[in-house]
Image (spheres, rainbow, N blue to C red):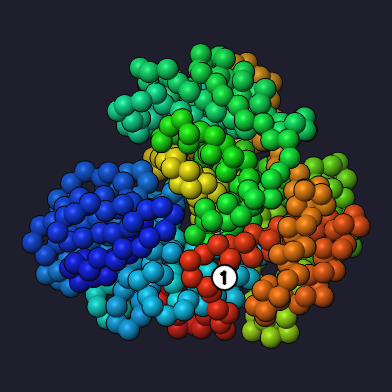
Amino acid sequence: MAAACLPPGMAHTERYQGSGATLAVCRDGSPAAGWHQRGIDGDTVAVCTTEQPDLLGRYRRYGEEMVNHLHGAFALAVWDGARGKLLLARDRTGEHTVYWRLAGGRLSFASQLWALLAEHQCTPELDPVALHHYLTYRYVPAPWSIVAGVGKLAPGTLLVWTGERATTRTYWRLDVRRREPAPSIGQAAEELRQRLTEVTRTRLAAAGPPQVLLSGGLGSSLVAAAVAQVSTAPVRTCTIGFTDPRLDQRQPARDVARYLGAEHAEHTVAGIDPAVLADLARCFDEPFSDPAAIPAYLVARHAGIRLADGFCGAGGAVVYGGYPHHLLLGWLNRWPQRATGLPVLHRIGAALVGQSTSGTPLRRMGRLLEVAGCPPRRRYARIVGQCSESQKAALYTDDLCEELAGMDSSRLADEAYAASTARGDLARMIDADTRGYLPGETLTRLRATGVGHGLRLNCPLLDHQLLDRAAGLPAGWKVPYRRRSLARQLAAGWLPVRTDWSAAPSARRPPIAAWLRHELRDLAWDLLTDRTCAGRGLFRPAAVRKLLAEHQAGIDHSGEIFALVQLELWLRAGPRELAPRPPTNDHELAAMAP
C-alpha cells in the first residue's frame, strides 16, 4: 500500500484504487494506508511507512540529519512549510521504496509506483535505459524506475526539494573499516547474536504468535532461533518445498523447527500453474524476473493466510558471506590474473552454459569457465548479471539498438565494486551487494511477494549496526566451507549440529528451464509472439521466436525468456499502459542520481 502526495502542505489527497486498497494521505490527520500519519506541527508535516517515534521532534532537533537517528525499515517524508522544503528518505538497506517525480515545478512521491502514476493524467512512458538494466539484473536498479521521468531513491539516500530543484545525497554506507583490535571469532559471533536478539525483540509484534519463513539456510534459521529466545508465544515456521530432491530444502527447515520446538507448516510444489506468473507480476511495482520469486510468492501466500506479520533471514549472507558468488569470485581471484582475461576460456564457458541445464555439473563448470575468462575487474558484474550486452542486442529492434548504443549495464556493478574502499575481494563484494543485489533483488522479491499477500516481513539481520559490526570482521572468517568460519560460530549453540552451516547456500532455484519447455511453454509462446508484444516495438519478433525454438531444442535460454515473459505480464497487469520512449537524457539522469 502507498500514498501519492503533493507538497506544499501535503493537503492534496490522491486516492488510488488498486490491489484492493484505497491509498491516501491527508494534512488533516485522517488515516492513510501504507503511510503512518505521525505528526503535524503548524506548517510541518511528517509521514512514514513504519512506526518511528517522535518524527517531528527529531526533525526540529536534527533537521536533515534526523535520518541518522532512525532505525529499521522506513520511507520518510517531511514537509517544512515555513522553509518551503520537502525531505524524502529511504532506509539504509532499502527495505522500503520511495518513488518520486518532478514535473512542471511540482514534486510528487509515493511508496508504490502505481500510486504515483495515478496522480498524473498523462500516459506514462517506458524508459528504455531502465529496461536495458532490467534485462541484465532481472530488476530495475535505483535511481532508475521503469517509467520515464520517475526516480527511485537508492538505499541510504536523502532527497531535498526546495521548490526550485531536487538534490540527493547518500547518508549511509556500510562501514567496511577493519575493527581494531579484532575480537576473537567466538567473541564476534556472540556480539552478533546479542545484537540480533535485541533487534528481534524490538521488532516483535505485541500480539499474536510470531511466524518465521524458513528457507533451510542459516540466515532464516538464526532469525528463528532469535525469535524463539525472545518470544513468550509459541513460534510458527513455514517453508516451501519441491518434489524434486535436488531442489528441496524442507528437511533442513524441519530440523531447525523441531530443534526450536516450533509449530511447523510446509507447502510442496510439484509443478507450476501458469496463472501463478500473472499473479506474481501483479505483486511488483516494476518488472522482476528472478525465478526465486516463485517460491517466495508461494510461501508468502501460504503464510499470509495464517498471520499478517512474519520474520525472514534476508541479509544473512551479507553478515557471514554466504552468497554463492562470494565463494566463486573469491576462489577465482586466487588464480593467476591477466588484465585482459582469457577470451577463449570465456567462449568455451559460454558455450557450455548455453548447452546445459541449470543446476547440473556441466552448467556449473560452464559458468565457472565463463567467469574465469573475464577480466578480473569485470567478474563481479558478470556473476550478478543475467543477460549480456550481446544477448540483449540480438533481441532489440533496430531503433532500440540505436537508442541504446554505447549503454553498458554491467558498468553499474563494475563501478560499485571498484568504488568500494573495503580491503579484500570478499569485503568489496559484500559492500557492492548492499548497494545493488541486496535491495534490488533480495529485498524487492521478499517485499513485493509478502505485501501481495498481506504479509509484512521483518528482516532483523538488516539492522545497520549489526551489518556494520559484521563488515569490519576479517574476511577470512566469511569464507564458506572453512572449519573456523563465522557461519559455524553463529550457529553453535543456537541451532542443531550440521556439518554444512558454513557452506554457501545452494542455488536451489525453481526448474524454470524445464517449466518453460513443458508447463509454461504455451504461456511463453502465446505472450511473446502475439501482436500486443510485437506492437511494442521493443524486440524483434523473429529473434524472440528463434529464442523460444532454440530453448525447446535444448539450448538453455530460460533466463532471457523468463525476463521477457515477466516483463510482458507486468505490462499487461498494470492499471496504466506504458508507451515506449527514448532513453532518459543526461539532464534527467543528473537530477535522479545520488
As drawn, 570 above or below 478: below
Q: Position of residue 424 (x, y in %)?
A: 60, 48
As drawn, 592 above or below 345: below
Q: Which amino acid does label 1 sit on?
A: Ala
Task: Name the residue located 14 percent from the left edge and 59 percent from the top edge.
Answer: 28
Residue 144 appears in view = no
Is residue 59 rendered to the left or right of residue 74?
left
Q: Position of residue 184 (x, y in %)?
A: 51, 26
As drawn, 580 above or below 57: below
Q: Which residue in the protein does label 1 denote?
A: 130
Is residue 63 rendered to the left or right of residue 285?
left
The kind of secondary structure element at disc 1 is: helix
As drawn, 181 above or below 526: above
- Occupied quadrant, residue 391: bottom right
Task: Name the residue located 64 percent from the left edge and 84 percent from the top edge.
Answer: 403
Task: Name the residue located 33 percent from the left edge and 56 percent from the top edge.
Answer: 22
Task: Pick the residue in front: 189 or 18.
Answer: 18
Residue 532 appears in view = yes
Q: What quarter of the picture does the C terminus occupy? A: bottom left
Q: Where is residue 550 in the image (x, y as percent from the top left)?
A: 88, 62
Task: Pick the residue in front: 522 or 396.
Answer: 522
Q: Where is residue 281 in the image (x, y as percent from the top left)?
A: 58, 56
For this orientation, the residue located farthest to the left is 42
Task: Name the residue located 64 percent from the left edge and 59 percent from the top edge.
Answer: 566
Mark 1 closeness class: few <14, some 14–19, many ≥20 residues within 10 Å: many
Task: Pick the residue in front: 495 or 337.
Answer: 495
Is residue 482 rendered to the left or right of residue 371?
left
